[in-house]
Amino acid sequence: MLDIVVCRNVLIHFNQQARDGVLKGFHAALGDSGLLILGKSEAVAGAALDWYELVDPRNKVYRKTVLRNS
């Protein structure tokens, strides 16, 4: 498991479906309190909103949300 993933200014080049796939892969690779850092012009959107919580809007730092089976 990873503690941090830095992916700056890459996701802006993908369509939403590809971004969701990448963010899902990052979610699987991160530990329970892992961090994701994106570029200034990027944001978590779409289906991935359930997978991350924004912890530092200015620096685009997100924390992995642990998904629970209901």
Image: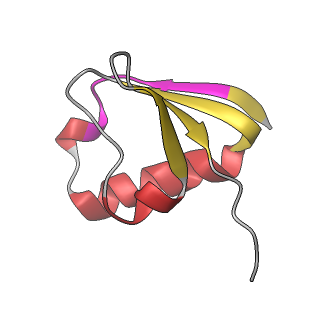
Identify the residue at image location x=38%, y=16%. 59
**Quadrant where the N terminus is found in the figure:** top right
Say whether residue 68 is left or right of residue 60: right
Q: Position of residue 10 (x, y in %)?
A: 30, 31
Residue 31 sits in quarter: top right
Identify the residue at image location x=74%, y=36%. 33
Say whether residue 70 is left or right of residue 19: right
Q: Furthest-top residue in view?
A: 59
Q: Position of residue 25 (x, y in %)?
A: 57, 52
- 55 within the magenta span: no
Q: Looking at the picture, does residue 41 appear above or below residue 69?
A: above
Q: How is the image coloured?
A: secondary structure
Q: Looking at the picture, does residue 45 appear above or below residue 5?
A: below
Q: Position of residue 65 (x, y in %)?
A: 63, 50
Identify the residue at image location x=25%, y=21%. 40
Q: Looking at the picture, does residue 9 appear above or below residue 47?
A: above
Magenta extent: 4-11
Depth order, front residue of 48/13: 48
Q: Looking at the picture, does residue 36 appear above or below residue 16?
A: above
Image label count:
0
**Quadrant where the C terminus is found in the figure:** bottom right
